[in-house]
Image: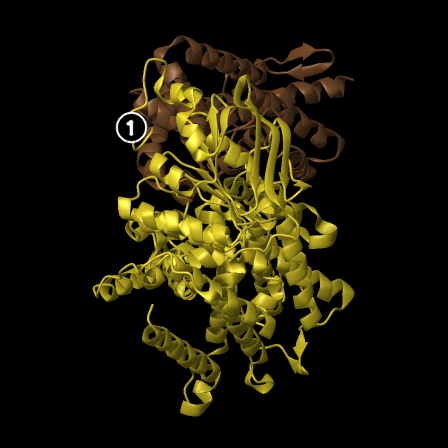
Amino acid sequence: MGASIQYFLSGLSIGGVYALLALGFSMMWSVARAANFNHGDIFMVGGMGTVVFLGLGLPVWVSAVLAILIATIAGALIERFLIRPFNREPNSVGWMLTTVAIGVMIVGASTALLGSAARPLPSPLMDEPLRIGGAGIFPQELLLPAVAVLTTLALYLFQSRTHLGRAIRAVAANRTAAELMGIDADRVTLYVFAVAGGLGALAGFLVAPVIQASTTIGLAFGLKAFMVAIIAGITNPAGVVIVALVFGVVERFIEGYFSTSARDAVGFSIMILVLLAFPQGIFARKEVAKV
Amino acid sequence: MTDTFRRTVAGILILLVAGMCVLPWYGTIFDSRFPTSFDLRIYTRIMIFAIVVIGLNILVGAAGLVSLGHAALYGFGAHVAALLALRAGVGFVPGVIGSVALTAAMGAVLAYPSVRVRGVFLAVITVAFGLVFVNVLREWVPVTGGASGLSSIPRGEFLGLPLTLRPNAWYALYYVVLFCLVLSFLLQYTILRSYLGRAMRASAMSENAARALGISIIRTRTIAFMISAGFAGLAGALFTNLALFVNYESFRFTQSVEFLLMAILGGAGTLLGPLVGTVTVFYSSVLLQAFEQWQTFFYGLMLLVVLFAMPKGVVGSIEGWLVQRQSSGRTPASSDWPHWTPDLEGVVRPPAAGQTETLRLEGLTLRFGGLVAVDSVDLVATTGSVHALIGPNGAGKSSVINMISGFYRPSAGTIRLAGHDVTGVASTDMAAAGVARTFQNTELFGAMSALENVMVGFHGSFSCGILAAAARTPAARRQEAQARAQAKALLDFVGLTEFADVAASSLPFGHQRRLEIARALALRPRLLLLDEPAAGLTHGEIEDLVRLIQVLAKRNLTILLVEHHVDMIMAVSDHVTVLDYGQVIASGRPGEIRENPRVIEAYFGHAAKPTPHQETVQ
């Protein structure tokens, strides 16, 4: 029983990371029908950036804000220069190639400069574990799903209450119609990619004390988050967050009851099977293809 | 591309292959130390890479799909071959066949679930496969040997010769790999130029148009990925026989990116691109090794530079430049159309004996959430008639067309085609059943020539299998020749003979409409759905279009026409059905409809009176 609670709680923690990343994928996809394929490497920038700035003697909060700011700007730049010009036709694949290329460059350069060793990030929330029903969990770990859920709620509020939020929904629903109504769809898309980049880096910063930061961590995290978003139904943010949390828990149970090495193989196989059963995604809103 | 150009390229390739054949003996003939066995090893390796890239080229260049897991598929093939040789004592040839078959099957498992919704998802799944594959190799020690890999793999034999790179065995391995590369290159050529290759390109350019021509997108993409994986499996098996040792190090994500870079840099979709790309990237990577940890960074940078500076790759850019230089000649002109010739008699399906009605809609309804777009529509189109469907914008005309052609599933009601209930049948199957359509906003395969566009329409008429098409069996050649001849006849019918080799996207707008009709006729339809065919046409073109519709109707083709041009409707239709807010408000002969007060009200509102000179109703 204690073990199950332990798996559940630490699963929620890692699921919170997937949720924040998958939410980014969902936001980007909704407005652009494309996404930053290397979103996981932006996530890496959040953790590694904080560690590096901390090493330069800056306070932790300043380091984190700087790292997140860099990721936000990177998100915007990637949209403007690597996605927008390569996503002009309905079935373009160019944006995938350009973002994969920049991802490889980011990882290559940071590994060459910083080495591939994992770096710890100290946090006061990792000092004393909380005891819950025989399981021990650090407050830092619980912070992740909490932030993910709060972010989703904030996003919903933002999208229903503010002018920009409504513009984002309009662009997501029908880009051409939104443009005809005077919405600058390109600018809205740019903002969304910037916010997605910032959220990704936030996740990277928050999880670094738990799993340590390293330059090559992004690929697997980004990929799982993208797959989670796909099987959830990528245009439904709430669905995406739910599936991400569930997937995190499922992974921990696989680790617990089989082995750590079986985690990825079993996890991905489950996701492929779910995709077979729900080709549009579990929580997909039916998308009517315009003919 | 002219014949002279094609012959030049073929000549260069034959010389290249001849040179590659002689190469191992260069040292013996000229008493030189070159090539050493190390050199031959490098060349063999490059040829193996080229086979992977040829497979990737079919996927990226034709099917428009991206794989970021080809290194893993290559590794999968290598491990299958290694395990077959080590554990089951399987010989070289059956080992290679086993690798190809199992890797292709693995490809199907990956592709089928992911290409159903969006091609992009396939790329995600392939990355996942790559990560899981390396993970499994590292952890499943009893089978894969973990980090130490599988070593002491028995050396294969072919025709009694040990597969080595030594002169005493006649460089057997080198020649086997060279043979496989030549074979792969030829297969690439035949596949890309077969009906399957056209279907891949068509699906990548316009999913809707491909489906309307009876092409299953899922099937086509899954097959494309299987073929691509099969090439990777072949290369993997050859790699095992070259290295006699496999572990996960050679099959990581970076290697997948390198393969992709090779395909893109060479020129995706071109025949020579894979060769050029593989050699270029291979030798650059040798140079890049000097930069050690920065190597992967430079792969990314190279990919980015190519995508910005030369998106068509080296070969694609050169081809584009040559085409541009040639096309400075005289501009093609349209010939008189419609031009009916006896060759075209096979174009329209003869109706079954005693069949009097082709289409019957009963209570057809379509709801989008709370909105009723089409509301209990009844309609009968008698065989050989021209039935017009008119109504103000948003009346639901296109939705009716989309339901009949299987793009939308009706919420209620039935659709009968020649007496058979076809309600809810998918678009691909409706095309096979003889329902052809055009689109309100023309959906041509832009980068394909006019002739190829029409030939895609003959997709369903190919009864030869994929293997037969790739091997160019006599039956496959005959079907291909027949499709080409009929496509030419159809182009002639719409007056576009001189435009046969022009890319569809560079045709004038009116010509594009005509091409779309010719392509729809390639289905040998019994029912032709024309969605605003006259929109954007000149007066003269509309007159020609009217005659074309009459010619087809005279040959018993049933036509359902959505149009706004009142003159045209009056001239061609036998029957008119008027929709407003999704409901049928009038139905009858054109003359009756013109006088019908409800129709006038729907178009002009209460107060307006019909003006006798009104020509176009919007």
A47 w.r.t. B560: above or below? above
The residue under label 1 is: B612
| Residue B1 in picture, x, y percent from top left | 34, 67
Check disc 1 and give the amino acid type. Pro
Q: Quadrant of the C terminus of chain B?
A: top left
A118 w.r.t. B417: above or below? above
Residue at screen point 45% across, 44% down: B438
> Is residue B269 something one can see in this rendering?
no
> Chain A's colour?
brown
A17 w.r.t. B541: above or below? above
> Is residue B516 something one can see in this rendering?
yes
Residue at screen point 44% across, 91% down: B29
Of the pair B193 and A83, the residue shown nearer to us: B193
Res. B391 image quadrant: top left
Of the pair B356 and B50, the residue shown nearer to us: B356
Which chain is the one coloured yellow? B
Of the pair B319 and A121, the residue shown nearer to us: B319
Residue at screen point 39% across, 52% down: B515
How packed is label 1: few (under 14 Cα within 10 Å), some, or many (20 or more)?
few
Of the pair B90 and A50, the residue shown nearer to us: B90
